[in-house]
Amino acid sequence: MNPKLSKVLNLPNTISLVRVFLAPLVLLLLSLKINIRVPYLPDLGGGYITWGDFLAGGVFIVAALTDSLDGYIARKHKLVTTLGKFIDPLADKVLVIAAMVALVELRRVPAWIVVVIITREFVVTGLRLVASAEGVVIAASRGGKVKTVFQIVAISLLILKLPGGMALMWVAMILTVSSGMEYLIDGAKMLIEQ
């Protein structure tokens, strides 16, 4: 393999790329609506869990966990690359948006909440692109990281039809808006200072 290519396609970047390709699998498993009940799993108030939900939930959770893994490996082994800085947040967004779109189709989450969350992602990404063109790096904030955790937990619960999923989605939406405002304010200050 070409040495430059092997440097770019290092382990953390490969893990991030796998996450990108797992997102459509989550969407497919939910969209196929495999309505065969998983035996021995109790109905916890959201209806029985089907194999489609169970498999999609498993793939989603594994994919979400790879986000921490790739970052940890990249920092520990000094494998941070420009591609990694691009593909890692993109993979997160693709995974979350794919799952949320499927959940809208299944009527487990209102479409307007998904539109608010997607809009925030576009605004923050756009702001980062403008800042980057000006030579300013806008790092991930603590609020953005907390928002991501709440989104992932809420989506996991909604996929698996477990109690509390919609309540956590409301919290995630509020955190999404507030962290988005934080990025806008901080980003505007940084750009004005430039």
Image (spheres, helix red, strand yellow):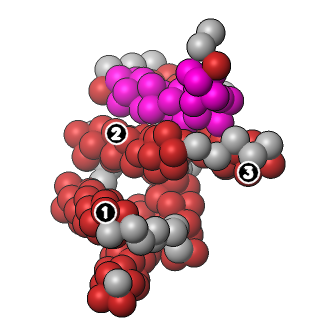
> Which residue corresponds to mark 2?
98
Residue at x 56%, y 69% (from the top left corner): 146
Q: Is residue 175 left or right of residue 194?
A: right
Indicate the position of residue 101 as horizontal and vertical percent values: 27, 43
Q: Nearer the viewer, residue 149 or 32?
A: 149
Magenta stretch encompasses residue 29: yes
Mark 2 vs 3: CB contact within 8 A: no
Which amino acid lies under the numbered mark 1 shown in the image of this protein?
A: Ala
Mark 1 vs 3: CB contact within 8 A: no
Q: Secondary structure at mark 2?
A: helix
Q: Nearer the viewer, mark 2 or mark 1?
A: 1
Q: Is residue 113 visible?
A: no
Residue 176, quarter of the rendered image: bottom left
Indicate the position of residue 15 as horizontal and vertical percent values: 61, 31
> Which residue corresponds to mark 1?
133
* Highlighted range, magenta: 4-30
Indicate the position of residue 117 as horizontal and vertical percent values: 30, 62
Q: Give me the disc on residue 75.
A: 3
- Label 1 neighbourhood size at 10 Å, few (<14), some (14-19), many (20+)? few
Q: Main secondary structure of the magenta part?
A: helix
Q: Secondary structure at mark 3?
A: helix
Q: Nearer the viewer, residue 62 or 185?
A: 185
Q: Nearer the viewer, residue 188 or 149?
A: 188
Q: Secondary structure at mark 1?
A: helix
Magenta stretch encompasses residue 21: yes
Indicate the position of residue 35 as horizontal and vertical percent values: 39, 22
Which amino acid lies under the numbered mark 2 shown in the image of this protein?
A: Ala
Residue at x 31%, y 62% (from the top left corner): 133
Q: With respect to residue 35, does 75 lie above or below?
A: below
Q: Is residue 113 left or right of residue 96?
A: left
